[in-house]
Image (cartoon, rainbow, N blue to C red):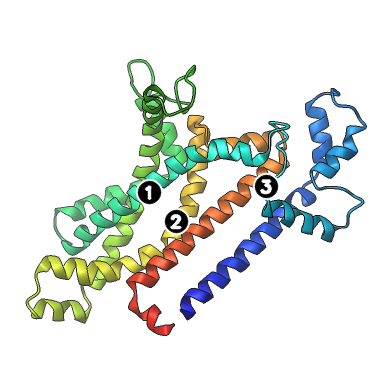
Amino acid sequence: MKYLLQRLGFYAFTAWAAITINFFIPRLTPGDPVQSLMNQFQGQLDPQAVQSLTVLFGLDEHQGLWEQYLAYWGQLAHGDLGISFKSFPTPVSEVIGQTLPWTIGLVGATTVLAFLAGTLIGVFAGWRRGSWADALLPATTFLASIPYFWLALVAIAFLTGPGSFLPSSGGYEPGLVPGWSGAFIASAAGHSLLPAATILVSSVAGWILGMRNMMVTVTAEDYITVAHAKGLSGRRVMLSYAARNALLPSVSGFGMALGLVVGGTFLVEVVFSYPGVGLELVQAIGVKDYPLMQGVFLVITLAVLAANLLADLAYLALDPRTRKEG
């Protein structure tokens, strides 16, 4: 219990710090976001609306910084992330809500699949070290060092084009209306194949290497020798003794790895023009959509913190020593 409370306190403090930093981002960024919005409409807005927009975006100079900060927390408590400049007057939460499912589907599926597949392959490769499985190590080392976006560019160059069934961009065929229809689901699945494969190939290699090396280290421990001496089957020793202990560093690093995967996925979304949060963020930066940038940064931060918390809970379930400390 003590361990769990310490981790919850740490993540609560980290979330507060992230939200506070997110509050100061538009206030420290050069330029006037309201003027940027006015320029976007090229004089179509009444100049008298400047003050109203300033108040709307929480940048009222008549309010002190502390009052603005408290107002910002009040907005977050009500799920209000502000108004998007790029899609004015659409709320930021609505813009993110339209693009987040694409990124969650892409990142979530590929990250979990890469972790499970890489861990399983790494367990067998480490348990049977010196066998033919070790011949795969040079290839996995090479793939693990390749950036996601570079592999995406190579995939587009060699796997798309005339005669290929793999689309090079977009999330679905133009003209389809997003929904739960069979045509749309089939089109979305086809457009996600190449981006997902790009992320999967790059990320699974790292899990294979990490798990294989940990298995090699764990199998040299005395308790593995004792388990064999007791007459336990090789499969039970591999899974219940070696793999369970070798898995702990991978579980604790899962949350951190998710942050790296999210960053790489954003670039993949840009390369494939995939309609996820990454592409939306790049477009927001291009038009200086500060509220949307704030909202995306906040969602990313909280998502990575949630993933780290889940990894800590899994670590707590797998390692009895942490429960004894509590």
Q: Could you say where residue 49 lies in the image, as x and y percent from the top left?
A: 88, 33
Give the residue drawn at x 58%, y 54%: 301
Residue 296 shows in this picture: yes
Lower position in the chain sequence, tag 1 or tag 3 = 1
Q: Within 10 angstroms of label 1, few (less than 14), some, or many (20 or more) residues? A: many
Task: State how far apart marks 1 and 2 are (Cα).
Answer: 9 Å
- What residue is shown at x 14% (from left), y 78% (from top)? 227
Q: Which mark is residue 221?
A: none
Q: Earlier in the sequence, mark 2 or mark 3?
A: 2
Q: In the rendered image, which residue does mark 2 sit on?
A: 257
Q: Quadrant of residue 250?
A: bottom left
Q: Is residue 95 left or right of residue 180?
A: right
Q: Position of residue 284 (x, y in %)?
A: 66, 36
Q: Residues within 10 Å of mark 3 (few under 14, many from 20)?
A: many
Q: Amino acid at mark 2?
A: Ala
- Left or right: residue 136 versus residue 248 is left
Q: Are marks 1 and 2 in contact (CB under 8 Å)?
A: yes
Mark 1 = which residue? 203
Q: Are marks 2 and 3 in contact (CB under 8 Å)?
A: no
Residue beneath the point at 40% across and 42% down: 199
Type of amino acid at the residue the image marks with label 3: Gln
First in sequence, mark 1 or 2: give its number.
1
Residue located beneath label 3 in the image: 294
Give the Cα separation between the discs numbered 1 and 3: 28 Å
Residue 54 vs residue 132, the one in the foreground: 54
Task: Report the amino acid beneath label 1.
Answer: Ser
